[in-house]
Image (spheres, grey):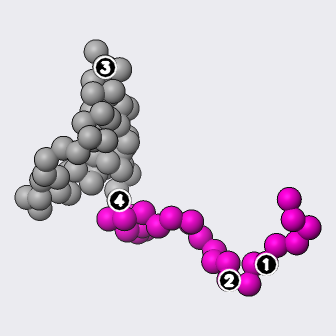
């Protein structure tokens, strides 16, 4: 380990910025959030994922074909709930 490190060119924040995602702040009604939290608990997935999917469905934008990572996640969720 070095005695000193040079942080002159260092940047704050995440090392790797997520691709295809944008962080936002949004206010939703309590009952909407509670419903998505309940659905997420029942399905074993995240409530933000469910909200994102509901917005995609509303906009008529399907996620397209499943990639390997998504397929593995879905299989794990199904095995947990089965």
- The quarter in which the C terminus is drawn is top left
Mark 3 or mark 1, which is nearer to you? 1
Which mark is on residue 9? 2
Residue 79, which numbered label? Answer: 3
- Can you name the residue that lies furthest to the right here? 3
Single out the residue that lies furthest toward the top. Answer: 82
| Sequence-earlier tag: 3 or 4 | 4
Q: Which residue is pictured at 63% across the width and 77% down the height? A: 11
On screen, residue 79 above or below 37: above
Label 3, secondary structure: give it.
helix
Q: Which residue is mark 4?
A: 28
Q: Are marks 2 and 1 in contact (CB under 8 Å)?
A: yes
Q: Residue at x 36, y 31 (%)?
A: 44
Question: Magenta residues, as a range?
Answer: 1-27
Magenta-colored stretch includes residue 43: no
| Mark 3 to mark 1 CA distance (whole Å) | 48 Å
User: Counting residues from the N terminus, which is met first, the one under dot 2 or under dot 4?
Assistant: 2
Mark nearest the camera among 3 and 4 is 3
Q: Is residue 19 left or right of residue 78?
A: right
Circle on res. 6: 1
Discs 4/1, front:
1
SS of the residue under disc 4: loop
Of the pair 81 and 5, the residue shown nearer to us: 5
The answer to whether residue 70 of the structure is visible from this angle is yes
Badge nearest the viewer, 2 or 3: 2
């Amino acid at each position: 380990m070095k005695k000193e490190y040079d942080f002159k060119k260092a940047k704050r924040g995440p090392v790797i910025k997520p691709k295809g995602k944008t962080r936002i702040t949004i206010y939703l009604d309590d009952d909407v959030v509670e419903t998505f939290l309940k659905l997420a608990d029942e399905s074993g997935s995240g409530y933000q994922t469910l909200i994102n999917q509901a917005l995609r469905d509303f906009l008529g934008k399907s996620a397209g074909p499943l990639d390997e990572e998504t397929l593995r996640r879905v299989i794990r969720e199904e095995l947990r709930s089965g």
